[in-house]
Amino acid sequence: MSNAITRLTDTEHAVSKGELESVFAQAVREAFAQGWTNMDISFRLADRARELGMADAAIDRTIEEEAAAAERKQRQEEERRKSEQTETSGGSGAGAGGGGNADQFAVNRSLAALFVRRETSRFLNLEPVALPWPADDWRGDFTRLLEAAFLPEETFALSQSAESRSAVIKAGDMQTRDEGAIAATLRKLDNGTSGVRINPSRGDRETDVLAYRHALLENRTLELGRQLAFYRALNLPCTALVNAGGDAIQAWVRIDARDLGEYVSRLNDMLKVLEDCGFEVESSVNDPLMRAAVPGTMSNKRQQYLLGLNEGASSYEEWKLWADAYLDGMPLIDRASQIAEPPEESLELLEGVFRESHRVVLRGPARCGKSLAALDLALSIASGEQWLGQATEESSVLFVNMESTPSNLIRRAFQIAEARGFEAAHERFDYLHLMGIEKNVAELADLIVKRVEAGRKWHQRPYSMIVLDGLGRYLPEREGMLTTGGDPVSTSLALDRIAVRTEAAVLVVLRDDQAERLQLPVDAEIRMVPDGSETRFEATTIHYPPLEPVRCRFDVPVFNRV
């Protein structure tokens, strides 16, 4: 998560009342930039701000203002893109990388949007979808769940709290009760720790299970809209999808096993597919008597309600056949009818040049200071300070070092930070030292993705930018050449893999001859051109209007505008 979102939702170090409104506003701004829906923001940020003492009126006003600002920004971006398209169609491309290179990039980008090079991975890069709001009669959602999940003659277990013994109720008896009586019963369960067992049973013990019909899946790390996108894109056989008070979306997934052994086997197979696709669920899901959220009740003053019934495949067997046919490492078909709004633009890291998830090349002749310039840029973005006159967005950066010893690189970072007035020991700046690692480009990409995903999962370290310095040492002699094992090595697809899996901008530092040989389809190129005692920085990008070259003088260890 971004910095303000992390600060606001940190339960161990609460934001002070004096800065609450400003932190909340920044968190909402970041959430809109990341594509969160109003509902996500209301559930995950507004409720937290309310807990910390922010008034409802101030919360609503802030969300409205930031939503309007995000909408204005989107309209401006659309107008700018239309203007650029008009200019491009009426004239020739400007600068290196324009014209036909942009067309070639568009083709490569569309093919790589969901593609991951490794056949062993089925990772999906999904945009969040909008969550439906509760129905007017949302208190009736529990009855609707019972009708979908249980036969009238079956019994189920319902508990008032995590500690209490469950009441065993016949599903048909509950389904035929008066709506007012059911609503009154559910109100008694509000804001507690009530739960309903996911399978027919006669109690809370393992021996009480009467049918191994459902497994309960939930992921508490992804935003709600992205969770729903995964459940739908993976065509899971969901009897019910439940918004569990804004904490997670719980899926009642059909397993339909004959016994516990088959239940565990089928579930493990499904979980392996989900993990390969980038969707990890809670580790305790193999319990056939898991307690699920009770739709139609409140949890921490937030509604728990149905998002859908009987979605996806009709059975586990049908889903397994579908998964074998579709989840093969290649892109899935996107249904336009399920895309209500265009995706939000990713975070702009360097003004007028590149954003998160963009691929960027910083190039120049040998020994012209490319590594120092890349390190300076990385520290500038981590600090939120201008770089060569261009504004940056304060964001976390990972600098992957493949050509210097750790001590030499860190000394350079301290020298640059001192010259710029930055902090070298920065909380948003990390190193990954890979000098001497014997791997090809594709294997390096796998390793970098693995480290970044582990950092996000275990240390809450999401990176907005990844710098690859020294990658030239690992480049194949030609694009697409084979390894000794017979696998093609594609630098372009390796960079795609890092950008897609991490959603970070990937900046590669290359010599001019390496850049010319590879001809990588990139979003932006920053070219360093020595000119006597000065160096010109020329930025070419396919997403922004052309920029004027910047003339700089090298004042060791940094480049300063003349």
Image (spheres, rainbow, N blue to C red):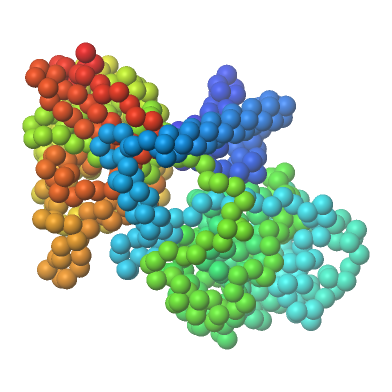
The relative height of residue 271 versus residue 316 in the rendered view (above or below) is above
Taking the image as drawn, is residue 400 in sight? no
At 60% from the left edge and 37% from the top edge, which residue is drawn? 45
Nearest the viewer among 490 and 541 is 541
Name the spot of residue 79 as percent of width and height, x first: 53, 33
399 sits to left or right of 142: left
441 sits to left or right of 272: left
At 26% from the left edge and 53% from the top edge, which residue is drawn? 492
The relative height of residue 409 versus residue 197 in the rendered view (above or below) is above
At 44% from the left edge and 55% from the top edge, which residue is drawn? 125
Name the spot of residue 475 as percent of width and height, x first: 14, 52
- Report the quarter where the C terminus lies: top left
Looking at the rendering, which quadrant does residue 189 occupy? bottom right
Nearest the viewer among 111 and 191 is 111
Looking at the rendering, which quadrant does residue 255 occupy? bottom right
Name the spot of residue 248 as percent of width and height, x first: 59, 53
In the image, farthest residue toward the bottom: 258
Looking at the rendering, which quadrant does residue 339 occupy? bottom right
At 79% from the left edge and 66% from the top edge, which residue is drawn? 143
Name the spot of residue 392 as percent of width and height, x first: 37, 26
In the rendered picture of this protein, how many numbered marks are placed on residues? 0
Taking the image as drawn, is residue 321 in sight? yes
